[in-house]
Image (cartoon, grey):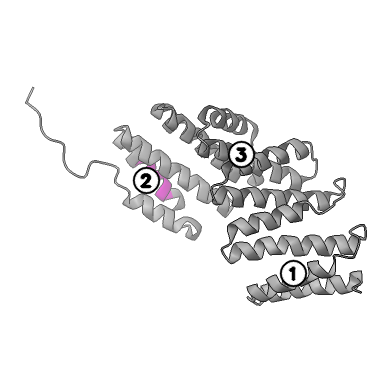
Amino acid sequence: MTDPQQLRARADEVFERHESGDLEGALDAADALLAASASLSVDDPVVRESVFAARFERGVLLTELGDLAAAAEAYAEAAATPADLTDPDQRHEVVMAELNRAVLADAVGRHDEALDTYDAIVTRFAAAADPVTAELVVRARVNRAAALLALDRVAEALAASETLVADLDGAQPGEAEQLAMAVRIRASALRAMDRADEAAAALVAVERCNAEDPAARVQVVAAQADRVRWLSDLGRHDEADDLVTAVVRRFGDDPEVAGAVEELRRMPHRDVDPPTRGHDR
């Protein structure tokens, strides 16, 4: 019979195989751990920790192996592991598993399932006081707005993203990336409603974002690229050109966003062909 300490050793083996690049071997080791734990009670904290770790690692491994649908199910199983939700560590583990499940459901086109999962995260954990869980809940709110947009529930996506833009503090590094994403969702919703001028104007709010974090910089540059395209579509070419110049000046030497900035440089901001001359006036 496997005892809890043997189970912990099996969990270490899963991580070691993963770190060595043996994904299939790590997956087999995780499956073996879960089979060995079948007769043990998750009331034992070591058993619970080991079972959760194996289930979560299965999600990570299946994602890296490209089986996203199976990975989503693995994360759902991890989230279902009994947990003491008054314990901040166990609470944020559960939320992370649910969030990963929803992200992968979104990735394979199961937007309704993703939306239900995001809703459940927000409903269950909105009042969480610990910073890690609170950050995950913000991510769930932003992803929820994106899922609404993907489901063509545009008015709801607009309302959700407007609330986020009002709530989030772009000066805080932990919120800047999520604010930039919310700004882009809001602008996309406005554009989907044929409110193109408002959509372009909405993207100005991305300038509130602290871009110290690389992930935030990626979103800020992407938002500015959206704005350049949309200004060009509106015929506001001088504004588009000025914005490209400003973005290149600010981020042109940044390796984290070098590809996006170079793409922005190459983006056509004016008509390729000269306009046809009309009658002299």
Tell me, yes or no, if residue 251 can be seen here. Answer: yes
- Give the crowd class for mark 3: few <14, some 14-19, many >=20 residues within 10 Å: many
x and y percent of residue 140 in the render? Answer: 66, 42
262 relative to 39, above or below: above
- Give the crowd class for mark 2: few <14, some 14-19, many >=20 residues within 10 Å: some
247 relative to 238, above or below: below
Residue position marked by numbered label 3 in the rendering? 144
Residue position marked by numbered label 1 in the rendering? 30
Residue at (79, 66) in percent of width and height: 34
Residue type at numbered disc 3? Arg
Res 182 → quadrant: top right
Mark closer to the chain start, 2 or 3: 3
Residue position marked by numbered label 2 in the rendering? 245
* Helix, strand or loop status at disc 1: helix
Quarter of the figure with the C terminus? top left
x and y percent of residue 259 in the render? Answer: 42, 58
x and y percent of residue 160 in the render? Answer: 60, 31
- In the image, taking residue 103 as reference, residue 131 lies left or right, namely right
Q: Nearer the viewer, residue 184 or 109?
A: 109
Q: Nearer the viewer, residue 169 or 164?
A: 164
Residue at (66, 39) in percent of width and height: 116
Residue type at numbered disc 1? Ala
Q: Are marks 2 and 3 in contact (CB under 8 Å)?
A: no
* Helix, strand or loop status at disc 2: helix
Residue at (70, 76) in percent of width and height: 17
Quarter of the figure with the N terminus? bottom right
